[in-house]
């Protein structure tokens, strides 16, 4: 197909795409144009379209498409063009830029962007850039060509500074080179721009803006770093920019240019600061009166950037500096419809405050001390202004905000929620600068009248000040001196009685902020004993308010934790129990519910009367008992299949009930520590709830992962809280964990709970057989039997991590004779661990390696134990048998673990394991010359493991050096273990994993690290296929 036909087809497709009423036609046209862009013919067709003088089929839309095609192809496919082709394309684009120098502007911009992208991707050193600027000189003198030059000079720096994702085909070195090449023409560019400012047509608003936009691009690139810095303050272009502030059409661009200059050139703030008084008088004050937000915002941005760039200049307290501060205070106080203006100044206030608060030399410190009093009133005023701007707007009370415009967490407008979040640092800095006493005095001025009934309470002001009090709590509390916040506490107490006078939405926000204050200052409440009970009632009432519930739950927990004497008042106990009894009917999250139950449990745990505690627990846990019974009574088989709404509700209630019980177990640890003849509160709970839990664990409800996790977590907390009291139930628990895991093998929580039980009771020999039997059942499960390759471990990393964590707990916690009795189980799991330690998943691999290290540490303790130690022989025989069966796999697994990109994170563990294994071989051989476990065995394992590696995993000749190097390092590392164990036997200190401090351990670690670093790009797979 000829070029003319393609041009016609392109024009037709563009017209259809933009104007056809049938969507099917537009889709077809778009698909054809996309395919066309990917063809080599697109270069010539697009270039020809832009070069055509006139044609009945070619209009602006077609020309714009042609420009876009060239830009995209240059960015993606320019490497396919020859050097001559790129030169011809550059000339064609220059001609097109000249042709469209008077517009349309959108088309001219596309052409200039394409031309910039082409020059950036040119590989010939400097030549394309030099040619381009030579062509620009010619173009500048040709009629309206300066328009094209101005646009091209604007987009050239932008092409360098654009987001890197758009420049994926250009490496950083080329970008840097291109930047330096165009910056070498800085003088000519600035001269050109200066010439444009003196043209007769400068009063044309569009042209002034174009000059500013071009200058902004070059400032961002760093053009003023290419000229003498002393010339910048008096540079004519700076005068031009400053004068452009007075032009409403160029104001925003002028602000951007000045802001960039101030942030990049440290000498400019001193020059511009005196000029800000003129800006204030001529621009800011009239804008504040007229409510011109765009002008106020621009000036606030400029002044804040100026002050932030030179805080020491502002801190001198000159008339200009104080005037700058006053201007910014006015900007903060301006009641705009959003909070962006005030927010734009925050970093300036923080920078200035940090300058005053920071450590300086003695001369700077004396200057700050002299000028700081001038700024104390400024920051006092700032505090008032920020709190005023942080107030809830009237529109919330009036219901003018749509739900989508409100922040889901705080209930505030999105802009205000973000503004408040960003007030954290400024309010803390103000509190530090003023001091907590003065800060609170300013913040709580007039607070005595808040709780009085004589005059209406300004609730919006109150809420904002409570918010500020909460935000500054870190500094106030760090002072260590009790401040008078009595008015605030009294206000909170009477809030409920005044609730009918407040709009509900505002009341809820007040409740939230008040609860946050109570939570932060809960440690001070012991000084207000008379208001504690009303405060508990206040926090309880907030649990039904969605916006305030999280703050109230957290505050309730902190109050109960910080006030241990709450249980002395029966009214407090009654109130907390009432909260707990009604908790099941309140829609809280599990985190919020946990806060409330922790609060109640903390107070109940401090009761000294067993009968009172048992009665309280019976009341508190009855709703949980009923909810679990209701779940067990539901038709689980049918409901699970049908996912009925009723079953979902019962399931959620059951999960919350189990969760509440578990939280309470955690809080009652150690409650009633004196003997109570079998009437211990924890034992009563266990006796009451275990039958329910046993039925729950045996039900199909465990298919739900949330219920399973919550039940297991509660059981774990019960085991940890009760200690010996749970011993009689241990067989039932281990059987339930085994059976449930076999039924639902994706739920690793059963393995974790079994681990908790072993950790708590593993030291008791009578449970050894039970634990071994449980581990055998779990190890023979289908899920664990599938752990035969590193890939299978990566498929189920949580399962692998939990399983090897359970085994680690077993070998650490149980007596040696119990570990020896599990030799078959350990052999199987040890081989699996040697496979899983090569998995890509870091957690699974490290869990497997930790298990191996823990077992080897137990083995070492058996070998180094005195001969008279009972049962040493049985464990030693088991260790020898396991090591002989698994030793080669362990060495091979460590080598594979040190291959690939994630190997460096495993060097430490691999070093420990090889050091322990080496020590076992050397110590065993030295202790018994007939032992099959000796240095020769270790060498044979290493040789076999290295020789079994695929040839592509190692470098040529590496086998010959690797084996002797590793053997030497492993022998030295084994010597460290011997010294450590000998030291321990002589009263010294030693421990598993602590051997790497020796010279041999460090030597082995260095050898393994170098191996891992040299093979980081090897991606092996390990384990039977």
Image: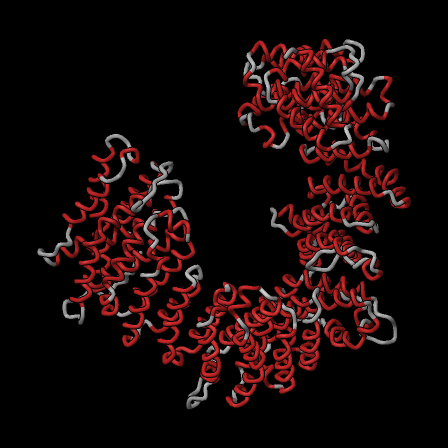
Depth order, front residue of 92/308: 92
Residue positioned 79% across, 66% down in the render: 445
* Extreme-left residue of the structure: 930
Query: Residue 602 in the image: x percent, y percent?
Result: 55, 77
Say left or right for 349 vs 826: right
Residue 909 x %, y %: 33, 51
* Residue 803, placed above or below residue 348: below
User: In the rendered picture of this protein, how many numbered marks are placed on residues?
Assistant: 0
The structure residue drawn at horizontal position 68% and vertical position 63%, both measured from the top left corner, is 470
Relative vertical location of residue 579 with respect to residue 238 in this rendering, above or below = below
Q: Quadrant of the C terminus?
A: top left
- Assign the N terminus to one quadrant of the image: top right
Residue 746 in the image: above or below residue 665: above
Q: In this view, does 471 lie to the left or right of 749?
A: right
Residue 28 rendering spot, x and y as whole percentages: 68, 28
- The answer to which image quadrant residue 216 occupies is top right
- Whether residue 639 sits left or right of residue 435 in the image: it is left
Residue shown at the point (55%, 12%) measured from the top left: 82
Quarter of the image where one finds residue 126: top right
User: Residue 577, percent across and down?
Assistant: 61, 81
Residue 377 visible in the picture: no
């Amino acid at each position: 197909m000829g070029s003319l036909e393609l041009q016609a087809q392109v024009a037709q497709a563009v017209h259809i795409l933009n104007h056809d009423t049938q969507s099917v036609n537009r889709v077809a046209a778009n698909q054809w144009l996309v395919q066309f862009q990917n063809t080599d013919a697109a270069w010539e067709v697009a270039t020809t379209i832009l070069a055509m003088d006139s044609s009945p089929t070619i209009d602006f839309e077609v020309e714009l498409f042609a420009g876009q095609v060239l830009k995209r192809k240059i960015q993606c496919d320019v490497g396919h063009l020859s050097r001559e082709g790129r030169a011809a394309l550059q000339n064609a684009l220059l001609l097109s830029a000249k042709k469209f120098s008077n517009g349309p502007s959108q088309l001219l911009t596309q052409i200039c962007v394409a031309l910039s992208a082409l020059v950036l991707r040119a590989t010939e050193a400097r030549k394309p850039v030099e040619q381009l600027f030579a062509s620009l000189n010619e173009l500048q003198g040709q009629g309206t060509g300066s328009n094209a030059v101005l646009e091209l000079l604007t987009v050239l720096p932008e092409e360098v500074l654009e987001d890197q994702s758009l420049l994926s085909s250009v490496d950083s070195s080329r970008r840097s080179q291109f930047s330096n090449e165009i910056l070498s023409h800085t003088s000519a560019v600035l001269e050109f721009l200066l010439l444009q400012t003196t043209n007769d047509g400068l009063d044309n608003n569009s042209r002034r803006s174009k000059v500013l936009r071009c200058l902004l691009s070059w400032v961002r690139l760093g053009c003023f770093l290419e000229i003498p810095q002393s010339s910048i303050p008096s540079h004519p272009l700076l005068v031009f920019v400053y004068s452009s502030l007075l032009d409403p059409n160029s104001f925003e661009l002028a602000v951007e240019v000045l802001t960039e200059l101030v942030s990049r050139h440290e000498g400019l703030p001193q020059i511009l600061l005196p000029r800000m008084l003129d800006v204030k008088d001529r621009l800011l004050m009239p804008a504040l009166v007229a409510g011109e937000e765009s002008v106020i915002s621009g000036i606030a941005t400029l002044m804040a950037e100026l002050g932030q760039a030179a805080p020491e200049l502002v801190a001198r307290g000159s008339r200009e500096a104080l005037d700058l501060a006053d201007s910014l205070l006015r900007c903060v106080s301006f009641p705009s419809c959003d909070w962006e203006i005030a927010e734009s100044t925050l970093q300036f206030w923080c920078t200035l405050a940090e300058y005053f608060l920071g450590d300086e030399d003695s001369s700077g410190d004396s200057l700050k001390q002299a000028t700081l009093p001038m700024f104390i009133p400024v920051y006092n005023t700032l505090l008032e202004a920020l709190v005023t701007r942080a107030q809830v707007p009237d529109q919330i009370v009036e219901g003018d905000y749509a739900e989508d415009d409100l922040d889901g967490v705080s209930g505030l407008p999105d802009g205000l929620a973000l503004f408040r979040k960003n007030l954290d640092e400024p309010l803390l800095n103000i509190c530090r600068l003023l001091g907590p006493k003065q800060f609170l005095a300013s913040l709580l001025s007039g607070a005595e009248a808040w709780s009085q009934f004589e005059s209406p309470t300004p609730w919006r002001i109150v809420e904002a000040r409570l918010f500020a009090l909460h935000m500054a709590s870190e500094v106030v509390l760090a002072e260590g001196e009790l401040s008078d916040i009595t008015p605030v506490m009294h206000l909170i107490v009477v809030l409920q009685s005044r609730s009918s006078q407040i709009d509900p939405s505002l009341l809820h926000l007040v409740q939230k902020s008040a609860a946050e204050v109570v939570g932060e200052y809960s440690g001070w409440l012991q000084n207000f004993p008379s208001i504690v009970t009303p405060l508990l009632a206040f926090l309880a009432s907030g649990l039904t308010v969605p916006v305030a519930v999280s703050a109230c739950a957290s505050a309730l927990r902190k109050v109960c934790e910080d006030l241990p004497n709450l249980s002395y008042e029966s009214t407090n106990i009654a109130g907390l129990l009432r909260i707990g009894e009604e908790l099941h009917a309140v829609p809280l999250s599990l985190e919020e519910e946990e806060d409330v139950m922790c609060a109640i449990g903390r107070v109940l745990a401090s009761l000294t009367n067993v009968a009172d505690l048992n009665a309280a627990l019976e009341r508190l846990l009855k709703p949980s008992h009923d909810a679990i019974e209701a779940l067990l009574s539901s038709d689980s088989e049918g409901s699970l299949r049908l996912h009925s709404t009723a079953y979902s509700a019962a399931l959620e209630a059951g999960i919350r009930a189990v969760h509440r019980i578990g939280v309470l177990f955690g809080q009652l640890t150690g409650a009633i520590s004196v003997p109570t003849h079998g009437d211990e509160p924890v034992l009563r709970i266990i006796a009451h709830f275990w039958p329910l839990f046993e039925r729950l664990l045996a039900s199909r409800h465990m298919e739900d992962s949330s219920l399973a996790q919550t039940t297991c977590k509660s059981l774990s907390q019960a085991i940890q809280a009760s200690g010996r009291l749970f011993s009689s139930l241990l067989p039932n628990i281990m059987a339930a964990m085994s059976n449930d895991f076999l039924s639902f093998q994706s739920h690793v929580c059963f393995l974790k709970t079994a681990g908790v039980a072993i950790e708590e009771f593993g030291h008791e020999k009578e449970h050894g057989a039970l634990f071994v039997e449980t581990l055998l059942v779990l190890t023979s499960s289908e899920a664990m039997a599938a752990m035969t390759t590193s890939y299978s471990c990566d498929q189920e990393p949580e399962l692998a991590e939990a399983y090897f964590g359970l085994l680690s707990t077993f070998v650490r916690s149980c007596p040696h004779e119990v570990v020896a009795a599990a030799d078959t189980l350990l052999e199987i799991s040890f081989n699996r661990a040697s496979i899983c330690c090569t998995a890509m998943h870091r957690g699974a691999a490290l869990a497997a390696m930790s298990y191996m290290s823990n077992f080897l540490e137990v083995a070492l303790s058996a070998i180094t134990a005195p001969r008279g130690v009972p049962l040493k022989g049985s464990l030693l025989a088991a260790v020898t048998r396991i090591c002989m069966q698994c030793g080669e796999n362990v060495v091979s697994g460590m080598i594979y673990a040190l291959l690939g990109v994630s190997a460096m994170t495993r060097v430490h563990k691999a070093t420990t394991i090889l050091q322990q294994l080496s020590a076992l071989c050397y110590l065993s051989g030295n202790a018994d010359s007939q032992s099959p476990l000796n240095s020769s065995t270790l060498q044979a394992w290493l040789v076999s493991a290295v020789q079994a590696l695929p040839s592509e995993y190692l470098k040529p000749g590496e086998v010959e050096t690797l084996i002797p190097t590793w053997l030497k390092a492993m022998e030295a590392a084994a010597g460290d273990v011997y010294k450590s164990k000998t030291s321990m036997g002589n009263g010294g200190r030693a421990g598993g994993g602590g051997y790497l401090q020796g010279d041999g351990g460090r030597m082995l670690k260095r050898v393994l690290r170098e191996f891992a670093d040299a093979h980081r790009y090897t991606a092996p797979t390990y384990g039977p296929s």
